[in-house]
């Protein structure tokens, strides 16, 4: 197995780290889970709740993370109102289309939105169409009983903005995202003629309780991991911030594995050149890139 004997530090949030750890361990790695990011509520849910109360007025619903999908689901469908499983209900009260068919693996070559003339199969169900940034987000949408209408060919904000631009003029779009997200997507869509409402669903916070674990890990060379995975720009920024707080620096000669170009640029801005970059910003691609690098 290509990762046998490799110790890999995972910096994802605690609830998202287990899947990546399991995949790496299946290739022989020993994983170390120290989150450098945690998800907390926004300062207020009022803008998000207000937008969800008039969901049917939007032409497009935009998701750029799995976390945004999950929080959308919880705010729109509180526990006392939940059905046994999302796929078993049409959710007629949502003002948004549900699907009974599983969402197949998105194909970038086929990730186009049906023309208005072709969308006649559900004429009595007003709903915003759904655009997602990547396949993990598309699966999250499927898991709550909905379906994604648009997936960009590249899983970054720039590609999503380009894919949505033809649909932007005059469109009313709701973007559900983190409070600290990049503004490229809403700015590009606004410039293309859309009205974009931004609803903050969560904030990213640095978990200071990770400092003792990082001190133990980086206190002496025999403890160093062979690699560190970075699955977002925030994980990179926060790791360096946590190390600085602990009076530590990132040791040289550790493989730095980045999930994509935005995360790689953040590492460079922090003074660290990524060793490995996934060919597309997905967890499977990141794992494959690491395995290829060491094999």
Image (cartoon, helix red, strand yellow):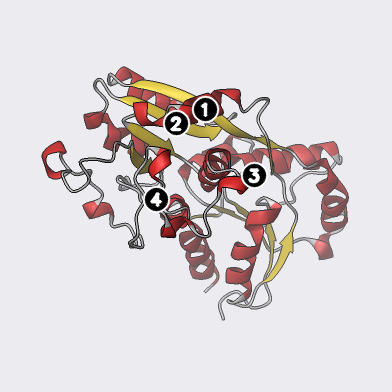
Residue 283 percent across, percent down from the top left:
51, 59
Q: Callout 2: 10 Å neighbours few (<14), some, many (20+)?
A: many
Residue 20 percent across, percent down from the top left:
60, 63
Q: Nearer the viewer, residue 50 or 251?
A: 50
Q: Is residue 89 left or right of residue 232?
A: left
Asked if one can make out residue 194 in the rendered structure from this viewpoint, the answer is yes
Q: CA distance from mark 3 to mark 1?
A: 22 Å
Q: Nearer the viewer, mark 3 or mark 1?
A: 1
**Helix, strand or loop status at disc 1:** strand
**Disc number for residue 175:** 2
Residue 166 percent across, percent down from the top left:
21, 30
Dot 2 or dot 4: first in sequence order is 4
Dot 4 or dot 1: first in sequence order is 4
- Residue ID for mark 3: 235
**62, above or below 194, in the image:** below
- Residue ID for mark 1: 199
Whether pointer 3 and pointer 2 mark residues with C-beta atoms closer than 8 Å, the reply is: no
Identify the residue shown where x is 34% and y is 55%: 99
Identify the residue shown where x is 23% and y is 43%: 113
- Residue ID for mark 4: 146
Whether pointer 2 and pointer 4 mark residues with C-beta atoms closer than 8 Å, the reply is: no
Q: Callout 3: 10 Å neighbours few (<14), some, many (20+)?
A: many
Dot 3 or dot 4: first in sequence order is 4
Q: Nearer the viewer, residue 266 or 19?
A: 19
Residue 112 percent across, percent down from the top left:
22, 46
């Amino acid at each position: 197995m290509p990762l046998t004997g490799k110790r890999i530090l995972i910096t994802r949030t605690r609830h998202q780290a287990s899947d990546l750890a399991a995949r790496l361990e299946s290739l022989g790695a020993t994983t170390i889970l120290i989150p450098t990011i945690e998800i907390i509520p926004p300062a207020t849910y009022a803008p998000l709740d207000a937008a969800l109360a008039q969901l049917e007025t939007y032409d497009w619903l935009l998701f750029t993370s799995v976390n945004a999908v999950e929080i959308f689901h919880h705010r729109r469908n509180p526990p006392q109102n939940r059905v046994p499983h999302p796929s078993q209900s049409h959710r007629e009260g949502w003002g948004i289309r549900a699907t009974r068919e599983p969402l197949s693996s998105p194909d970038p070559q086929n990730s186009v939105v049906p023309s208005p003339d072709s969308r006649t199969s559900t004429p009595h169900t007003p709903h915003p169409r759904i655009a997602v940034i990547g396949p993990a987000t598309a699966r999250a949408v499927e898991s709550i009983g909905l379906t994604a209408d648009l997936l960009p060919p590249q899983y970054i904000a720039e590609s999503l903005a380009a894919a949505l631009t033809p649909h932007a003029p005059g469109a009313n779009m709701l973007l559900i995202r983190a409070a600290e997200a990049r503004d490229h997507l809403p700015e590009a869509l606004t410039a293309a003629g859309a009205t974009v409402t931004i609803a903050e669903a969560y904030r990213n916070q640095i978990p200071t309780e990770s400092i003792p674990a990082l001190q133990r890990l980086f206190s002496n060379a025999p403890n160093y991991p062979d690699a560190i995975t970075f699955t977002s720009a925030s994980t990179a920024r926060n790791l360096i911030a946590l190390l600085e707080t602990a009076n530590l620096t990132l040791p040289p000669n550790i493989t730095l594995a980045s999930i994509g170009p935005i995360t790689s640029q953040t590492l460079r801005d922090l003074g660290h050149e990524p060793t490995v970059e996934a060919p597309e910003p997905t967890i499977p691609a990141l794992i494959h890139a690491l395995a290829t690098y060491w094999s």
